[in-house]
């Protein structure tokens, strides 16, 4: 089975940088996603990592280490609109194709 | 707009009833995933269909069933509804082997 862990809540200041960690255990790994979800809305795609290393996309970057079962999402130049939940999700390899989500990290941005 | 359409947006029904939630995936996407999200809970994987065939099941109750039709739209059927089934139900679609799964806006089900 799969197990995905991420902190429940984090707080950061507008303009600062925050790193949200995610650790996972899976029987077969075929990629890791980060999604942003505002309360009551649909998750929106932020990033996808399948190989080790850092993927940068504007203010957001995502890192993956497959050997450590570890990823992080880095948000720079925080804005108030970044207050949301950030969901780490893992895709299993093989025919049994599931995308399993962690419980999410609720990020609060303070002015 | 993700291109994934879910109907209805809101649904209020009584315990013991049966409802059907509908999802139209993005054009060209063969995979449809269904998720349940209760208040302050994470996204719980229910089921995955690919090109009409069931591919994976999560913690889906026996009272729940789904199917994907030849035109690739999918329906999630919830029966003998209980108060605890009140939640947001999302579907997501993706290409075969695609990197992204795109989510619909969800159906908010309230069981009273």
Image (tube, coloured by chain):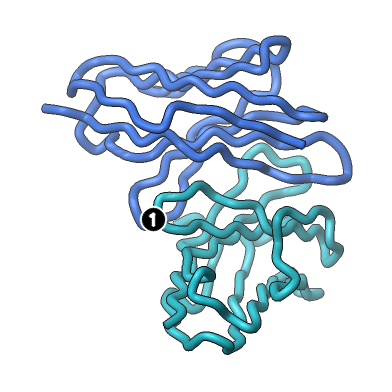
Chain colours: A blue, B cyan
Q: Position of residue A9 (x, y in %)?
A: 35, 31
Where is A30 relative to A71, above or below?
below
> For residue B98, which quarter of the picture?
top right
Q: Position of residue A87 (x, y in %)?
A: 49, 37
Which residue is painted at 44% across and 54% down in the image? A42
Q: Is residue B105 visible?
A: yes
Q: Is residue B29 visible?
A: no
Which residue is painted at 78% across and 60% down in the image? B49
**What element does badge 1 sit on?**
loop
> For residue A31, which quarter of the picture?
top right
Where is A79 relative to B74, above or below?
above
Q: Quadrant of the C terminus of chain A?
A: top left
Which residue is painted at 65% across and 82% down in the image? B79
Q: Position of residue B101 (x, y in %)?
A: 61, 47
- Report whether B8 appears left or right of A78: right
Q: Position of residue A100 (x, y in %)?
A: 65, 42
Q: Quadrant of the N terminus of chain A?
A: top right
Instruction: Return the residue found at the far left.
Output: A111
The residue lying toward the viewer, choosing from A83 and B104, is A83
Which residue is painted at 61% across and 31% down in the image? A4
The residue lying toward the viewer, choosing from A75 and A28, is A28
- Report whether A48 appears left or right of A57: right
- Report whether A106 appears left or right of A51: left
- The crowding category of the residue bearing disc 1, from other C-alpha atoms within 10 Å (few below 14, some 14 to 19, many at least 20), is some
Q: Which residue is mark 1?
A: A41
The residue lying toward the viewer, choosing from B111 and B73, is B111
The residue lying toward the viewer, choosing from B26 and B49, is B49
Query: Which chain is mark 1 on?
Result: A
């Amino acid at each position: 089975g799969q197990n995905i862990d991420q902190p429940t809540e984090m707080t950061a200041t507008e303009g600062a940088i925050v790193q949200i960690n995610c650790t996972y255990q899976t029987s077969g790994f075929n990629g890791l996603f980060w999604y942003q979800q505002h309360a009551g809305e649909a998750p929106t795609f932020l990033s996808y990592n399948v190989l080790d290393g850092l993927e940068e996309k504007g203010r957001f970057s995502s890192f993956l280490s497959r050997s450590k079962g570890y990823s992080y999402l880095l948000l720079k130049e925080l804005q108030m609109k970044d207050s949301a939940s950030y969901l780490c999700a893992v895709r299993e390899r093989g025919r049994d194709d599931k995308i399993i989500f962690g419980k999410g990290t609720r990020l609060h941005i303070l002015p | 707009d993700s291109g994934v359409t879910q109907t209805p947006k809101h649904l209020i029904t009584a315990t013991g009833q049966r409802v059907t939630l509908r999802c139209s995936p993005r054009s060209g996407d063969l995979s449809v995933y269904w998720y349940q999200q209760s208040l302050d809970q994470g996204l719980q994987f229910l089921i995955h269909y690919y090109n009409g065939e069931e591919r994976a099941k999560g913690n889906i109750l026996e009272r729940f069933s789904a199917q994907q039709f030849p035109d690739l739209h999918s329906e999630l059927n919830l029966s003998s509804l209980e108060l605890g089934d009140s939640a947001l139900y999302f579907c997501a679609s993706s290409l075969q082997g695609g990197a992204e799964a795109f989510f619909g806006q969800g159906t908010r089900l309230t069981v009273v």
